[in-house]
């Protein structure tokens, strides 16, 4: 789901801080930065980062699309002074300089944040490599397979395995790799990132991440709890109904080993053949009066070639904004695959239409907003009016095919079932990211009870048990001890979860605005395309998620529109399924 920006090995981060160690001195005692020298230093650092990021993103592209050797570690050689504490502090001072306008100050903050992330990334890159090597070399023994099976194949095997017993065996095998190979490395990394956060002037890694992501976690978590309480019963009923529908057994028998198979919605595979993935996307955007041209006049590259070593999961690379934007995809069909492509397409359109010259606003900043645009595109697969349009796309497509090759057409009742299924997954993701992950990761990263205290009353020093309890509650089914061993691998760098969390809400606010202004078939109205292009995407990474909420007429980033929309979707689904 993540836009691959390749901003370095780890991820990103931020700070507000003064250097650690010595006590705070009155600011006057520090010599003020000489404006001219400071501007020169700023430019130099930016030029070096720009060059490095360009090399890294092109490298990332070839790793992803061709299975090229990953040599990110080498790109960092000799860069220790670029990503130093001293440079982080330089930007802390720079941001306070007089005479900067709001944009300059914001750009400087994005620079500081990126440097801070790299400061942590350089120090911990060797853990990343170790995890990578351990994952790549780990194999497991499975009773029904002759040769040892690579660890990295287990997830796709689980997603395709029809036998529940075998899914559980796959899950057990995976958990053993976590326990014995990956978790010990990740435990050391966790210790180190917490030390580094303190070293660079923060109370905790949680506080550092909050600054980087520009989020007040305590407030956000309190809002989320209200949503959780209000809709918990509804989620429980929906989950039970969907497990019965998709899996054919009652919810009480459901385990985490089933989740990938459940998510694949196998019965719907036939309606979403691989060859329609890209045409469906083109049909969506052409209705909005948009095409795959960047505002620089180039085309967004879509690499859908089949190569043996290509990573099958779609991803977007904003190599140079706005002129060199690439999407890689290896379509395999099915609803999750369609959604992933639309998601990455949303990122691509955002960067291809970014109309700002400042590199900081093209490439840096946090990802809450771009994830919002991506999820907005992805979510269209739960929209009734769009599914009707897709049915027409399929009918048109079938006219060109012999009877034996035609794609099945969904009935109204099936469209209803699909909408209900998509609502479940929207709720599942919000419960997982906005609720469970934020609570759990504030505990894991040593934020203290001031963050997770109101939501979790178990032991603080046992992340395995905390993970088990928190995620069991979020999912609505119990995780076993073994399944909860995922407590170290299921962690996103620098609270990326906080960006997804806001994106889930923002995407609904954007859609609501389009529905209100241009009607339920807004995707057939070029004015809708004009609006997102000029009023939203053009701003690149500069705006915060709150800025975008305001731009679409929502008072702030809250759960109101998300909640009313899922209720509305469920009512439509019930009607189509003949329930009401
Ligand atoms: Zn994304």
Image (spheres, rainbow, N blue to C red):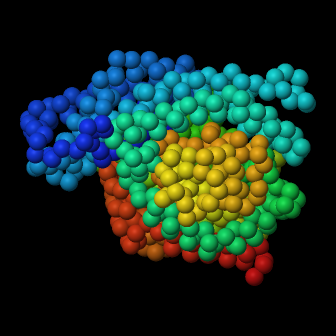
**Residue at (75%, 51%) from the top-left corner?**
479
Q: Position of residue 422 (x, y in %)?
A: 67, 61
Q: Position of residue 530 (x, y in %)?
A: 37, 60
- Residue 63 visible from this viewpoint: no
**Residue at (77%, 63%) from the top-left corner?**
242
The one nearer the camera, 317 or 521, is 317
Q: Position of residue 337 (x, y in %)?
A: 65, 46
Left or right? Give the position of 270 relative to 507. right
Within the image, what quadrant is residue 570 found in?
Answer: bottom right
Image height check: is 397 above or below 357?
below
**Residue at (61%, 75%) from the top-left corner?**
230
Left or right? Give the position of 427 relative to 160. left
Within the image, what quadrant is residue 167 found in?
Answer: top right
Image height check: is 16 above or below 56?
below
* Total count of labels: 0
The one nearer the camera, 34 or 197, is 197
**Residue at (55%, 60%) from the top-left corner?**
453
What residue occupies the far bottom of the structure in this picture?
580
The one nearer the camera, 494 or 355, is 494
Q: Position of residue 187 (x, y in %)?
A: 59, 34
- Residue 365 visible from this viewpoint: yes
Within the image, what quadrant is residue 423 found in?
Answer: bottom right
Quadrant where the C terminus sits is bottom right
């Amino acid at each position: 789901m993540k836009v691959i920006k390749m901003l370095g090995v780890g991820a990103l981060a931020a700070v507000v801080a003064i250097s650690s160690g010595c006590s705070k001195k009155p600011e006057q005692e520090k010599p003020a930065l000489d404006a001219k020298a400071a501007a020169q230093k700023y430019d130099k650092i930016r030029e070096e980062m720009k060059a490095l990021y360009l090399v890294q993103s092109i490298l990332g592209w070839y790793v992803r699309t061709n299975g090229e050797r990953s040599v990110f570690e080498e790109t960092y050689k000799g860069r220790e002074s670029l990503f130093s504490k001293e440079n982080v502090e330089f930007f802390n001072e720079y941001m306070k300089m007089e005479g900067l306008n709001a944009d300059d100050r914001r750009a400087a903050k994005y620079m500081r944040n990126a440097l801070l992330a790299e400061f942590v990334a350089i120090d911990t890159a060797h853990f990343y490599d170790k995890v990578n090597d351990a994952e790549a070399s780990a194999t497991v023994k499975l009773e029904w397979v002759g040769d040892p099976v690579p660890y990295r194949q287990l997830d796709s095997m689980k997603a395709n395995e029809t036998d529940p017993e075998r899914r559980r065996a796959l899950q057990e095998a995976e958990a053993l790799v976590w326990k014995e190979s990956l978790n010990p490395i990740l435990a050391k990394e966790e210790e180190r990132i917490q030390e580094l956060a303190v070293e660079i002037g923060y109370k905790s890694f949680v506080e550092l991440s909050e600054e980087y992501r520009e989020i007040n976690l305590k407030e956000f978590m309190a809002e989320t709890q209200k949503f959780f309480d209000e809709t918990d019963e509804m989620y429980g009923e929906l989950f039970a109904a969907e497990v019965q529908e998709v899996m054919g057994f009652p919810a009480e028998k459901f385990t985490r080993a089933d989740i990938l198979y459940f998510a694949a919605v196998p019965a719907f595979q036939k309606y979403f053949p691989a060859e329609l993935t890209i045409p469906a996307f083109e049909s969506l955007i052409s209705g909005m009066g948009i095409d795959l041209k960047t505002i620089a006049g180039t085309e967004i590259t879509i690499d859908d070639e089949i190569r043996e070593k290509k990573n099958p999961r779609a991803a977007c690379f904003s190599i140079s904004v706005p002129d060199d934007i690439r999407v890689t995809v290896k379509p395999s069909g099915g609803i999750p695959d369609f959604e992933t492509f639309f998601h990455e397409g949303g990122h691509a359109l955002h960067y291809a239409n970014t109309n700002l010259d400042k590199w900081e606003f093209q490439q840096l900043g946090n990802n809450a907003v771009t994830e919002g645009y991506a999820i907005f595109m992805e979510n269209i697969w739960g929209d009734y009016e769009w599914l009707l349009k897709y049915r027409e796309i399929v009918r048109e497509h079938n006219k060109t095919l012999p009877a034996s090759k035609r794609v099945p057409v969904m009935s109204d009742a099936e469209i209803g079932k699909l909408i209900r299924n998509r609502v479940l997954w929207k709720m599942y993701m919000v419960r997982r990211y906005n609720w469970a992950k934020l609570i759990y990761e504030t505990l894991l990263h040593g934020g203290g009870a001031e963050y997770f205290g109101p939501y979790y009353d178990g032991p603080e020093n046992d992340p395995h048990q905390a993970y088990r309890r928190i995620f069991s509650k979020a999912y609505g089914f119990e995780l076993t001890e073994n399944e909860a061993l995922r407590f170290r691998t299921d962690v996103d760098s620098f609270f990326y979860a906080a960006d997804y969390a806001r994106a889930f809400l923002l995407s609904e606010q954007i859609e609501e605005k389009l529905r209100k202004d241009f009607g339920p078939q807004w995707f057939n109205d070029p004015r809708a395309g004009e609006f997102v292009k000029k009023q939203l995407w053009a701003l690149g990474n500069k705006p915060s998620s709150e800025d975008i909420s305001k731009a679409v007429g929502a008072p702030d980033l809250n759960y109101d529109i998300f909640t009313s929309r899922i209720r509305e979707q469920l009512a439509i689904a019930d009607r189509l399924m003949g329930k009401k």
